[in-house]
Amino acid sequence: MPRATRSRVTPGVPACQAATALRAAVARARVPVEAVEQVIMGNVIAAGTGQAPARQAGLGAGLPPSHG
């Protein structure tokens, strides 16, 4: 069985996985999403990730479009 199927994180679109992690981090920090000004993520451009994965993750986590 591939390792990814045994993990707690389900395989999928990287930006969606990042959005889930970002949403949890914001909730855990008890910061209102409106207070987040930037999302900075490191990544390697890989096939299928699309453009601006940090922005995609921020929007997917419910951050306002103005977060940059």
Image (cartoon, grey):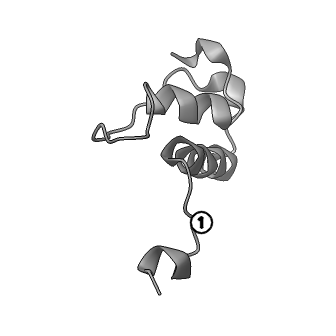
Can the viewer see residue 39? no
Total residue callouts: 1
Residue appearing at x 71%, y 32% in the figure:
62
Q: Residue furthest bottom?
A: 1
Residue appearing at x 56%, y 36% in the figure:
57
Residue appearing at x 30%, y 37% in the figure:
45
Q: 45 or 19, which is in the foreground?
A: 45
Query: In the picture shown, does residue 29 fall above or below 39?
Result: below
Helix, strand or loop at label 1? It is loop
Q: Residue furthest top?
A: 66
Query: In the picture shown, does residue 42 fall above or below 34?
Result: below
Q: Is residue 50 left or right of residue 10?
A: left
Query: In the picture shown, does residue 54 fall above or below 2?
Result: above
Can the viewer see residue 43? yes
Corner quadrant of residue 34: top right
Q: 46 or 25, which is in the foreground?
A: 46
Corner quadrant of residue 50: top left
The residue that mark 1 highlights is 10
Residues packed near mark 1 inside 10 Å, few (<14), some (14 to 19) or many (20 plus): few
Q: Is residue 53 left or right of residue 46?
A: right
Residue type marked 1? Thr
Q: List x then y, in percent, for residue 10.
A: 59, 66
Q: Residue furthest left?
A: 44
Q: List x then y, in percent, for residue 44.
A: 27, 41
Q: List x then y, in percent, for residue 51.
A: 43, 25
Corner quadrant of residue 9: bottom right
